[in-house]
Image: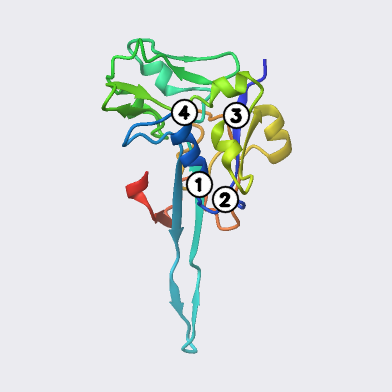
Amino acid sequence: MATLGFYFNAERCTGCKACQVACKDKWDLNTGVTWRRVVEYSGGNWVANSDGTYTQNVFAYYVSVACNHCENPLCVQVCPANAITKREDGIVIINQDACIGCRYCEWNCPYGAPQFDEEQGVMTKCNMCYDAVDAGESPSCVAACPQRALYFGDLDELRAEHGDLAGVAPLPDPDITQPALVVTPHRDSAPVGSNAGVLANPEEI
């Protein structure tokens, strides 16, 4: 069976957050729980030249990120209740009936994908809209993107078409979990681990 993954084209993303809103709406997520988040990463400054003029290297770009249904999901490994499983197609799912709300998965995921729902007392996260996928449809975030910056499909096919880059700043090192993610970088994208910029919207993440 093919392993499914997400494709994100940073050149197309305008930071509109339609993907984020569509996800929250479909799953009726409680306050404080946001499975897909849109990160704004920016940096640069103005530089004084010897002739009295100024030049600048200011940049900003967006990264849409959710659970990446990793090949090596740390959330699965650390769950003491065995409440998190990985399907044959690679989709990682939380069984909330088995979840004890210990938050180990949240603390170990470098993407911060699992999120604690205070009202339910259990962990939640992106499940790649497996109900839609099983019906031959797209995840809600993919379907909602007006710029077609998000896509999903057979991970091998995505890599064959778009390359194997799996991260840009401020995402973590993809070697940690081997995410099922392919990224086309923005023209100003900094590499993973770069400190060239900062999170411009930390209160939203």
Which element is circle 2 on? loop
Tag 4: amino acid: Cys
- Compared to 121, does 22 lie above or below? below
Front: mark 2 or 3: 2
Residue 58 in view: yes
Where is residue 130 shown, x and y percent of the image? 55, 21
Name the residue: 39% across, 36% down: 34
Q: How many marks?
A: 4
- Compared to 8, does 15 lie above or below? below
In this figure, which residue is indicated by the disc labeled 4? Answer: 126
- Compared to 185, does 165 lie above or below? above
Front: mark 2 or 1: 2
Viewer-proximal residue, 146 or 122?
Answer: 146
Distance between mark 2 and mark 4 Cα atoms: 20 Å
Viewer-proximal residue, 174 or 184?
Answer: 184
Which element is circle 4 on? loop
In this figure, which residue is indicated by the disc labeled 1? Answer: 63
Front: mark 4 or 3: 4
Which mark sits nearer the N-terminus, 2 or 1?
A: 2
Which element is circle 1 on? strand
Which mark sits nearer the N-terminus, 2 or 3?
A: 3
In this figure, which residue is indicated by the disc labeled 3? Answer: 5
Tag 1: amino acid: Val
Residues marked 2 and 1 touching at CB (< 8 Å):
yes
Residues marked 2 and 3 touching at CB (< 8 Å):
no
Residue 182 in view: no
Bin the neighbour count of mark 4 within 10 Å (Cα to Cα): few under 14, some 14-19, many 20 and up. many
Where is residue 190 shown, x and y percent of the image? 52, 53
